[in-house]
Image (cartoon, grey):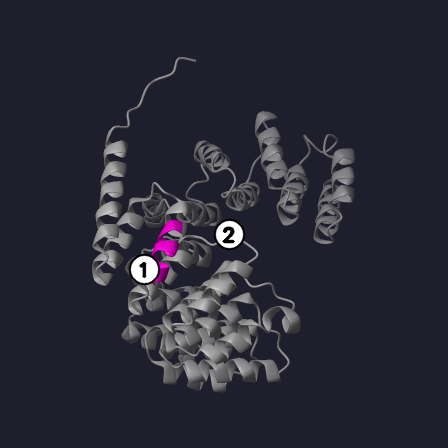
Amino acid sequence: FECSCFTLSALVDMYSNCNVLCEARKLFDQYSSWAASAYGNVALWNSMISGYVLNEQNEEAITLLSHIHSSGMCIDSYTFTSALKACINLLNFNSRFALQVHGLIVTSGYELDYIVGSNLIDLYARLGNVKSALELFHRLPKKDVVAWSGLIMGCTKHGLNSLAYLLFRDMINSNQDVNQFIISSVLKVCSCLASLRRGKQVHAFCVKRGFEKEDITLTSLIDMYLKCGEIDDGLALFKFMPERDVVSWTGIIVGCGQNGRAKEAIAYFQEMIQSRLKPNEITFLGVLSACRHAGLVEEAWTIFTSMKPEYGLEPHLEHYYCMVDLLGQAGCFDDAEQLIAEMPFKPDKTIWASMLKACETHNNTKLVSIIAEQLLATSPEDPSKYVMLSNVYATLGMWDSLSKVRKAGKKLGEKKAGMSWIEVSS
């Protein structure tokens, strides 16, 4: 019987791995009650929970764990590990499960088990509760790559970049195995800190460990150099990249634009197209932003108008904003107004604010009043718009308009100050 139980577990694993969860569940339902009190039955239940997690049926996995607990059956570290993975997958929807499973882990005495503990650290780091993750990390007698990577990536995700880098350094000093995903995360940390020195240290580590040849690591290294302002180093790495995908091409185009090298951004965009790779919306946004910062109207217009007919991509509001801002700063107000009128969606605050700034730059007092009316219509109770208009009117010497907008802003402030809360009985 013991052999049969593990054979059933293997069959459930097979069906789950083949995405045939209904067959796995059918087999489980047929034999789980029969195996409930037998030695080795926990393997069958663990396989079913793991199968649910593998097939993104995470709430079902938690429900099955609850049934095991209420039935008084054996729960081991593999049960809790799968349950914690289900909790991690459910974090965007419901964090209540995570707290309940942690409570069960504590009462079962598995909190300091290195496999369970590592996944708990990953869970709390993802939740943003880095303090609890750190406390458990220091208490854990044995720390594996899951614990280290979970904590480092959690710190990175929640903006604790200096702490993430220190943890990475401690991880290396502890002779832990480091994978390319941790390297990618730490390089992002260096980018956020704009720390070229640390970035070069990580690059040297990559060369020493052979990570430099990995596509994920190379893309992260290029991104780090571009964001730290060392664009030539980034370009050198890009040129020796064996295989370039849309992500790497887009990164180099965006990086060139951000470093004031718009002509190169356009050249790389054209080279990408010649290599038969299809640009995506972010690629177009990157090259249009480069044109916007450099004032390249004709080049931007050619690229923008190619999005739908040549690549089947509908321009988003961000693409329209780039074009409107570029046309406005170039003084092409008629073209900018026509483009706004042709937009398939309603212009937002950023569009009208861009036009307002262009009017200020080119002393276009005639258009300011029309833009101001549209800007205030988007959300009349936003006080920042009154401040923006006041500054523009003062710059252009439109004193009557300045007086009116200041009165309107003051009235809005008095209205907000007069607000009060009342309690409504249920």
- Residue 44 shown left or right of residue 126 in the figure: right
Mark 2 closeness class: few <14, some 14–19, many ≥20 residues within 10 Å: few
Magenta range: 366-373
Number of labels in the image equals: 2
Main SS category, magenta section: helix
Q: Does residue 192 appear in the picture of this structure?
A: no
Position in image of residue 320 (x %, y %): 49, 63
Q: Earlier in the sequence, mark 2 or mark 1?
A: 1
* Front-lying residue, 62 or 410: 410
Q: Image quarter for residue 204?
A: bottom left
Q: Kindly indicate the quadrant of the structure image that contains residue 8.
A: top right
Which label sits on residue 161? 1
For the point 40% across and 57% down, which residue is it? Answer: 352
Q: Quadrant of residue 113?
A: top left
Residue denoted by label 2: 346
The residue drawn where x is 21% and y is 60% is: 397
Name above or below for residue 268 compared with residue 40.
below
Tell me, yes or no, whether the highlighted magenta stretch contains residue 371: yes
User: Is 16 placed above or below 353 here?
Assistant: above
Discs 2/1, front: 2
Residue type marked 1: Asn
Judged left or right of residue 167, residue 270 is right
Label 2 sits on a secondary structure element that is: loop
**Who is closer to the viewer here, 390 or 271?**
390
User: Residue 350: percent from the left, percent from the top?
Assistant: 40, 57
Q: Does the magenta segment cover residue 206?
A: no
